[in-house]
Image (cartoon, helix red, strand yellow):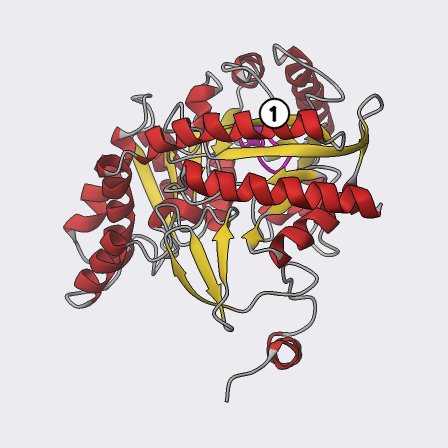
Amino acid sequence: MARNTQDLLSDRARLLGPNVATFYDDPLHIVRGEGVWLWDAAGRRYLDCYNNVPHVGHCNPRVVEAICRQAGTLNTHTRYLHDGILDYVERLTGTMAAASLNTAVLTCTGSEANDIALRMAEAVTGKRGIIATDATYHGNTSLVSQLSQSNVPQVGFGLEQYFRFVPAPDSLRHPDPDGRLFAASVADQISALEGEGPGFAALLVCPYFLNEGFPDHPDGWLKPTAEVVRKAGGLLICDEVQSGFGRTGTHFWAHEKMGVVPDVVTLGKPMANGHPVGGVVADRDIVAAFRNGYRYFNTFGGNPVSCAAAMAVLEEMDEAKLMENARLVGEYAKHRLRALREKHAVIGDVRGSGLIFGAELVLDRATHQPASALTDRVINEMRARGIILSKLGRHKNTLKIRPPMPFSAQNADLLFDTLDEVLGAVAASA
């Protein structure tokens, strides 16, 4: 007999332990997905405007077939030789404009990838000091969980001493059009690390600052920061778990959009359309320093089935021209959002690129006072009307719209027509 919602919640608490997060006041019980759609246990369909993990669409036929074909032939680890990992890494690194990003370590998650990246920084520089923004998330290993200031671990093996934070960029409240203010903040923390013991090893950022609310920055914005990091002898690590694989619509990788060549790129979520794959891409010398220093091995990382799934994602991206789709639909989405801003005073700012777009909701456009509670009401009302999205940013008041890459203009119309109704209803009841 199928569990109802309350039974599911009770059994989750009993079997999985406390504090296991769910979305929405009325959690969803999803049983099926296809393309940009999800269905719940009652058969209701939802437009998925949130999940970037199924990058080329839920249950994409090309990916499903690749997984089944390889799983029916062989799956083992990389201490046996197989072509799949080599073919995939060669194609993956071929998508990157910088010749220095030529070697990869494959993992199972983005958390593992970021953990490895930080260890690479120590191996190369001999130092341990890491800088990140104060409103970000980069994973949940003991090491990288220290970077999440919104959910600071209560225990951490004393690792907190190695981390310093800079204010997350905020283009609405604290404009920094050329990136020099952010670069100066990074320089200040580099000086602090160099003066207090651990030294400066790396800056780790999402180049499009998605968790920070994807502030509105021009292309090339990170160049001054990259110069500061290089001058200090540290590594620039770009976490492309959310921003990569063509999502911005203008570039395959967001670090290219932001005008920098990172020393290390980390990957995860969308890499294999939901199959657990992550990765770290860097120069051969950096990878060699890590491998010689740590003798790293991952039983499941880079296995033949994972590589087949990841390769199928790249093939689908190319053949379905999904980056171009992201550009075109993203431009249309921002047009629709700007029109909504003219109608609804609660929309304080519209931003995004490609299939990362959203609006920051405010109580007052003059003061930019965050409408955090109202944003939560909007998210839940959209869910009640069959649209799945979320929120992010320091104040949790920016709508997070990050759909699968096949998302269409027609899908966008449904999203924004519904959002128009919801904003009107929420404002009327405020």
Residue 327 lies in what quarter of the image? top left
Q: Which residue is mark 1?
A: 338
Label count reads 1
Q: What is the crowding at mark 1: few (fewer than 14 residues within 10 Å), some, or many (at least 20)?
A: some
Q: Is residue 119 visible?
A: no
Q: Residue at x 40, y 32 (%)?
A: 326
Of the pair 406 and 19, the residue shown nearer to us: 406
Magenta residues (range): 198-215
- Locate residue 168, reporting x and y percent: 69, 29
On whether residue 213 falls in the magenta region, the answer is yes
Of the pair 262 and 337, the residue shown nearer to us: 337
The reply, left or right, for residue 252 in relation to residue 356 is left
Q: Is residue 89 above or below residue 369?
A: below
Q: Is residue 79 above or below residue 426?
A: below
Q: Is residue 30 visible?
A: yes
On whether residue 267 falls in the magenta region, the answer is no
- Which quarter shows the C terminus? top right
Q: Is residue 62 above or below residue 253?
A: below
Element under disc 1: helix
The reply, left or right, for residue 266 in relation to residue 367 is left
> Looking at the picture, which amino acid does disc 1 mark?
Arg
Q: Which residue is outermost to the bottom?
A: 1
Residue 364 lies in what quarter of the image? top right
Q: What secondary structure prevails in the magenta region?
A: loop
- Locate residue 85, reporting x and y percent: 23, 48
Of the pair 23 and 139, the residue shown nearer to us: 23
Q: Is residue 180 above or below residue 107?
A: above
- Locate residue 339, reporting x and y percent: 61, 26
- Locate residue 10, reporting x and y percent: 66, 80
Q: Residue at x 72, y 39 (%)?
A: 397
Q: Residue at x 51, y 34 (%)?
A: 356
